[in-house]
Amino acid sequence: MTDTSTLVEPGSTAKLSKIEQAKADFCGVELAPQLSRLAAQGWDNLDEATLTIRLKWLGIFFRPVTPGRFMVRLRLPNGVIRSEQLSVLAEAVDRCGDQGSADITTRQNLQLRGLLLDDMADLMAAMERVGLTSRQSGHDNPRNITGNPLAGIDPEEIVDTRPLVDAIQARLLGPDGPRNLPRKFNVAVGGASDSFLLHNDLAYLPAMHNGALGFTVMVGGFFSAQRNALAIPLGLWLQGDQLPDFTLAVLRHFERHGNRAARNKSRLMYLIDALGLDAYRQAVVEAYGAVAPAAPMPVPHDGTHLVNRAPRDGLGVNAQKQQGLCWVGLHVPMGRLDAEGMEELARLAASYGDGELRLTEAQNALIVNVPAERVEALLAEPLLQRFSPSPSALQAEAVSCTGNHYCSFALIPTKTTAQEVLEELERRVELPHAVRMHWTGCPNACGQPYMGQIGLMGAKARHGGQMVEAAKIFLGGDMGADPRLAELHDKGVPLSQLPDVLEALLLERFGAKPLQAA
């Protein structure tokens, strides 16, 4: 069991780290009305804590590799965004010229890049006018809450996750929500049999209890440079309307008892280890009782659930459960968008559907509620040459983190490298089925390499007497009925040799066949 002496509560007289002291001194949420003043002061004149920590409470990120240019991370619960909202974001990216871009993230979210601090006050106001927020989307806060990207339109849906996810976000961002967690915290709600969510700190999977449909609670999933774990059953079952209060109770307990002495041991699973699962369960049930004293208590549950297969890619033309309507899933290579692509996606969603789009954890976009008779015209739109509804078996579910163009932790340029390698492999082999490939630039694992059938992590390796950019290779990640994390296969392949090594793996393990040379 972990040494509980490292669990430092807020308000304790124990010496705080620089990060914890900055959070204790001033909550970044309070900077919202001061953005114009901070911009006038100049980003390079801001104190380090404000620049690198507190602004993240507003979703504003200083990027050391692009000094003076900032990133804004949105909150898009359940990955839902409307055309008028996307147009506002496209305009912000367009103002940045060649420096501007946006990324679809593995949390069904958007990150805008290349922004100036001078533009932040106006951008935040413009987002608020169309119902968007970036509040508490970074640092030690609950991150974007994910759900079934097909919620409400899915013929295979068990439960519509949108109202549940919205209610959880409202509870967490409300006046009594957490503002100073020990570490970031991921929450997700499953709504279909392919809702793999075990990489989250707190996941609710659809489950039956005494003939009633509700959710079993899974806790402790996370990836990091030190440790990777899938969430485990907490042993509780909840009705849907209990999820917001229970989530708040879990986060309040984590805020009070999580590890603040060692950031590399501050995710929820370490707290569960320290207390023991039974004691932790009892503690969060008591915390729930304090949050919702009049509500029924969670009931014991064995952890069985209705999720039993890997996530669908959602690409192509698909019939919705609404008669006569379709969704059209588009592959966005490596999740990277420019202003023109964003504006065109917004136009297509408004012209062919009802203006709504969905973002997926595979970094793709879905245009929904398209009348069947309009599908053919949509498929003829020029943008669908860039964002294909029928990508190759390698491209369909390829996921990538930002890479070293924007992130100072990344050791390789993941997005460009991944795209070049995949295009080279497409010239060499054909595959009978999709192969899920996850790319990440460093051991922090933002690109989730452990979830890939093939995972790649930026590294350095010696080649020709020099240290060169390389990738570790992981194999065997499974998000199906028997979930498991990918395991290390090769600790360092130079990027120049990566196509050859991956080609051999695809031929040996994934049923690929070589293409005839032209």
Image (cartoon, grey):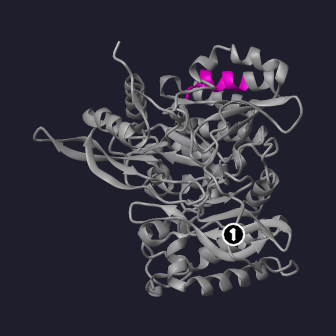
Q: Report whether residue 413 is seen.
A: no
Q: Is residue 260 left or right of residue 161?
A: left
- Residue at the (88%, 80%) spot, across then down: 294
Q: Which residue is mark 1?
A: 304
In which quadrant of the rendered view does residue 353 lie?
A: top right
How far across and down, in percent of the image, does residue 433 sit?
A: 53, 36
- Above or below, 386 against 2 in this view is above
Q: Classify residue 451 as left or right of residue 202.
A: left
Residue 194 horizontal/vertical position (percent):
67, 51
Q: Position of residue 45 (x, y in %)?
A: 44, 47
Count of numbered badges drawn on the protein: 1
Whether residue 122 appears in this view of the structure is yes
Q: Residue furthest left?
A: 465
For numbered disc 1, what is the local secondary structure?
A: loop
**Left or right position of 372 against 68:** right
Residues drawn in magenta: 337-347
Answer whether residue 428 is magenta in the image.
no
Locate residue 67: give its quadrant.
top left
- Image point (65%, 71%), residue name: 251
Kind of residue at badge 1 = Thr
Please tell me which residue lies in front, 112 or 470: 470
For the N terminus, the quadrant is bottom left
Q: Is residue 146 left or right of residue 504?
A: right
